[in-house]
Image: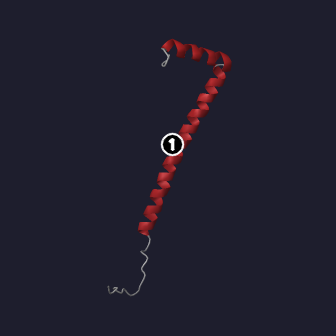
Amino acid sequence: MGSFSIWHWLIVLLVVVLVFGTKKLRNVGKDLGGAVSDFKDGMKGGEAAAKGKVEEASNAAPNVIEGEVKKDKV
């Protein structure tokens, strides 16, 4: 009772196909695939943007703050 056999999953799949139809399921699959693809592209774009910011920061002139360093007496 704890696990389902292959026959249980096939019956569930058959019921889902009968309820929703193959065209609707195909559209859901396309939408899901497009969402995953867009997510991956967004992650790559985020990494590229972060890498570009790091490169811009390394190419920029360093910030120099002039001042006096004092040592505390303990």
| Picture layout, residue 24 above or below residue 34 | above
| Picture layout, residue 66 above or below residue 39 | below
Type of colouring: secondary structure
Q: Position of residue 40 (x, y in %)?
A: 51, 42
In the picture, measured across the screen, residue 67 lies left or right of residue 24, that is left
Q: Position of residue 45 (x, y in %)?
A: 51, 50
Give the total number of marks visible in the rendering: 1
Q: Position of residue 52 (x, y in %)?
A: 47, 59
Residue at point 50%, 47% (across, down): 43
**Amino acid type for the residue under numbered disc 1:** Lys
In the picture, measured across the screen, residue 6 lies left or right of residue 35, that is left
When asked about the image quadrant of residue 31, the answer is top right
Neighbour tally class for label 1: few under 14, some 14-19, many 20 plus, Cα within 10 Å: few
Question: Relative to the observer, which residue lies in front, 38 or 73?
Answer: 73
Quadrant containing the C terminus in the rendered view? bottom left
- Helix, strand or loop status at disc 1: helix
When asked about the image quadrant of residue 25, the answer is top right
Q: Residue furthest front?
A: 74
When asked about the image quadrant of residue 18, the answer is top right
In the picture, measured across the screen, residue 18 lies left or right of residue 36, that is right
Residue at point 43%, 76% (across, down): 63
Q: Which residue is mark 1?
A: 40
Q: Position of residue 54 (x, y in %)?
A: 44, 62
Residue at point 54%, 38% (across, down): 36
